[in-house]
Amino acid sequence: MSQKTGAIFLDRDGVINENSSDHVKSWDEFQFIPNAIRTICELTETGLPIFVVTNQAAVNRGLMSVETLNDIHSRMLSIISGQGGKITKVYFCPHDNHEKCNCRKPEPGMLLQAAEEYNIDLKKSFMVGDAWTDIAAGRAVGAHGILLMTGRGRWNVATSWDKFGMDMSAAVDVADAAYIVKEHLAGRPVNTTDRLKNAFRMGLRSQEAWVL
Ligand SMILES: [Mg+2]
Ligand SMILES: [Zn+2]
């Protein structure tokens, strides 16, 4: 009986590249978030496979072709692999909300598909994203969610805490999330980081900071 491994699932927009409220519709609009490539290299060294799971409704809204999306992903992967990082596969959901598919996050379809194709134990997995819908997709299959403050994260943190309580982690950016992943893998689960606490303390009045 072979032991299934966990995996690291990364949302794309707001995690690996800067989020755009108008969608990232071409390679010209794709801008890596500082530290993201280095962090993917660092996460590659954990030995866990890394998957990207990204909602790309711009495809079915007619704003971008699947060919263009695949082009963006192949350029992204070649830059990452050129620096020593390995993303095993990029999964994307092309559907719009009203199509009610099972892959658009918060639905967990993309994670389930990866689990089936690569024999992944989702309960030993991590889902890193900047939206509550990322955390929800992970939780639906027992993966540990890590919400980032990059991208849309700051506008999603209150909703996420409301929905998931302390049963999730929060981090400044993907580099910070890598620290949380590694602590969990080492048997020292933590829910946040000093960087995030400091960032919040700077932004909060003293009587608000106690929650952290
Ligand atoms: Mg995102
Ligand atoms: Zn879908």
Image (cartoon, rainbow, N blue to C red):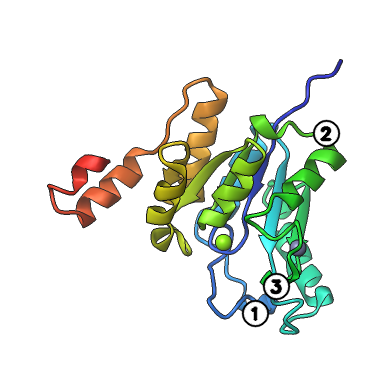
Q: Residue reaching furthest bottom?
A: 62
Residue at image location 78% in from the left, 76% down from the top:
68
On-image quarter of the N terminus = top right
**Earlier along the polypeptide chain: callout 1 or callout 3?**
1
Q: Which quarter holds ligand 1?
A: bottom right
Frontmost of labels 2 and 1 is 2
Q: Which mark is residue 28?
A: 1
List the residue tagged with mark 3. 98
Residue in view at x 26 percent, y 46 percent: 198
Badge 3: few (under 14), some or many (20 or more) residues near its Cα, within 10 Å?
Answer: few
Q: Residue at horizontal 67%, vertical 39%?
A: 141
Contact between marks 2 and 3 (CB within 8 A): the answer is: no
- Distance from disc 2 to disc 3, alpha carbons, whole Å, reads 31 Å
Q: Amino acid at mark 3?
A: His
**Among the 4 quarters of the image, the one containing residue 26:** bottom right
Q: Along the polypeptide, which appears first: circle 2 or circle 1?
A: 1
- If you read the primary sequence from the N terminus, does the residue marked by circle 2 or circle 3 appear first? 3
The disc label shown at residue 119, or none: 2
Q: How many marks?
A: 3
What element does badge 2 sit on?
loop
Q: CA distance from mark 1 to mark 3?
A: 29 Å
